[in-house]
Image (cartoon, grey):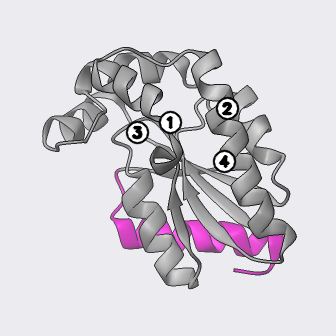
Amino acid sequence: MIVVVMGVSGSGKSVVGQALAHDLGWPFFDADDFHPPGNVAKMAAGTPLTDADRWPWLDRLSAEMGAIDKSGGNAVLACSALRQIYRDRIGRAGDVRFVHLAGSYDTIAARIAARKHAYMPASLLASQFAALEPPPDAITISVDDAIPAQVAKIRAALNSTSGSP
């Protein structure tokens, strides 16, 4: 199973994803690490990515996660996956479950203001919320909960839908 922890920048995808992976004993991957240099440069300059920028990146994520799934492995992937078409592309990897970390603009903007990201400036948060298509079939978790509570809720939801984690 591949669990994709998704949401806008600053929602806690990496932190919650790492905690979940640790709790499950699974490997953790951050989709940011798979961006080609051109995408990183655009984002660092405050320019939102286009779908043309994203397709090769999403295909690479799907291929990498698909290889894990096909080998019988499990993984946790932190990835924005803001639009349904992006989730569909990642979902080609096989047994993929999405966890949406949801929060208000103000809460997440405050988080972003308090952190330093390698290439995701706070100026892109509005475009992230504008692009977000909340998934109707994902496990939705509030970013207002403490990280251990988020992990516990994700595990409980995964157990109720698959009986495995």
* Marker disc for residue 56: 2
Quadrant in the picture for residue 115: top left
The numbered mark at residue 61 is 4
Kind of element beneath mark 3: loop
Instruction: Provide the residue designation for mark 1.
Output: 36
Determine crowd level at label 4: few under 14, some 14-19, many 20+ residues with C-alpha closer than 10 A.
Answer: many
Q: Is residue 150 magenta?
A: yes
What kind of element bears circle 4?
helix
Q: In the rendered view, would you say 16 is above or below 134?
A: below
Of label 3 and label 2, which has the lower sequence position? 2
**Who's the residue at 25% across and 41% down the image?**
118
The part of the chain drawn in magenta is 144-165
Residue sitting nearer the eye, 33 or 82: 33
Q: Does the image show residue 161? A: no
Q: Is residue 126 above or below residue 160?
A: above
* Residue 58 drawn at (x, y percent): 67, 37
Q: Residue 103's mark?
A: 3
Instruction: Judge from the rendering whether residue 109 lies leftward or rightward of residue 86; answer left or right.
Output: left
**Closer-to-camera residue (55/162):** 55
The mark that comes first in sequence, 2 or 4, is: 2
Q: Position of residue 35 (x, y in %)?
A: 50, 39
Residue type at mark 3?
Gly
Give how far apart the Cα atoms at labels 2 and 4 are: 9 Å
Q: Residue at x 37, y 61 (%)?
A: 15
Q: Amino acid at mark 1?
A: Pro
